[in-house]
Image: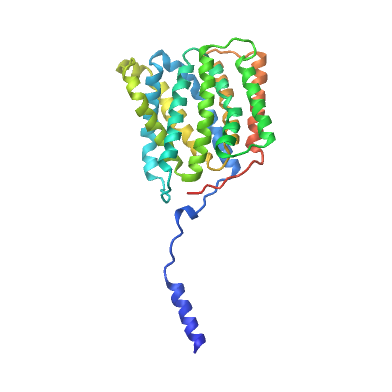
Amino acid sequence: MKGWSDLAHHFQTASKPQEPLPAVAMRSVMSRFKANSLLMLAAVIWGLGNVAHKTVLAHLDPMTVVFLTSGIAGLVTLPFAVRERTPAAKTGWFASVARVVLLFALGSVVQQLSYVSTTVTNSSLLISASTVITPVAAWLIMKERPSALILFVAVLTVVGSALLAGGFNGSATAGDAFAILTATCFAVWTVELGRHVQAHGRPVATATAQFVGTAAATLPFALQGRVTVPAIVAAWPELLMLGVFSTAVGFCLQSSAQRYTTSSHAAVICSGEGVFAAISAAALLGERLSPDGFLGAGLILCCVLFVAVSAGPKLTAAVP
């Protein structure tokens, strides 16, 4: 009879509802190629939108531009952030997202300031210096030691950026200095963003926090600028491009993709922004590339495509 009792106990146990797995135990996976493709798409969007960073200054001051574009992006992404699945609570979320928001706000402001006194091509390509700064920051902050190959590609990308921006002819401006400072800010931000979304998930909510935080931080300065209804109406095409596409879509793509690739890989792929910015600036603003510039653009594109299809490390997000 013992066998019958054991069998009955087995069926009773099997019929009980099973406890769901905790959210942190469920791992979501994105292929390396898909993550790199999202980063490439973000770079294309940013590159095409960089012309708007320059032309919008004919109507609004830099702080007002950052406030309005961040506010628009926050409104666009907020409904999606609310609907995003929430993982189990983890300690340190607020401090982590606060670092991401602070670095994003600082980088956004300095980037917009760079367009006051430099060309779209120069600003975009000098910001690509973050390609070589990011692996160093990742090594120091996350102990994410880059491979020798990635470091070599990063250096080649910076050389290409210098060629494309005319960095070897001594024609630097204050805007170029702001662009290099932007590169430093965004390099550290890229590392902090990767660490945050890999640990806490919710990439859209993280992006929304960046936009809302930046809008709140720049509001006092924007109120002191030349904010008028006619100026905003005149600038609405640029604000639409920057707020919806360059900011909301572009940075949400990066936040999602960086859960599954390293900061160093992300920095190299995103540096393709400078090439697309140079193309759009040539088409829309009449900026022309020198022979060195074409050489630099080709070098950057080769580096970006190499990293996009290379067998780099594939990360698995800790939370859905």
Displayed quadrant of residue 129: top right
Give coordinates of residue 198: x percent, y percent.
Answer: 51, 43
Q: Residue at x 38, y 45 (%)?
A: 83
Q: Residue furthest front?
A: 140
**Residue 84 on image: x %, y %:** 41, 45
Q: Residue 245, relative to residue 54: is it above or below? A: below
Q: How is the image coloured?
A: rainbow
User: Which residue lies at the image location 37% right of the left edge and 38% below the top edge?
Assistant: 78
* Rendered view: 75 above or below 86: above
Q: Nearer the viewer, residue 38 or 134?
A: 134
Residue 146 appears left or right of 119: right
Q: Is residue 52 visible?
A: no
Q: Is residue 296 left or right of residue 89?
A: right
Q: How many marks?
A: 0
Residue 187 picture location, percent across and down: 54, 29
What residue is rendered at 42% in x and 21% in y? 238
Percent position of residue 133, x then y: 58, 28
Residue 289: name its quadrant.
top right
Residue occupying the point 66% across, 23% down: 298
Residue 298 is left or right of residue 93, and the answer is right
Let me know if residue 76 appears in the view: yes
| Placement of 16 over or under 123, stated as above or below | below
The residue furthest bottom is: 1
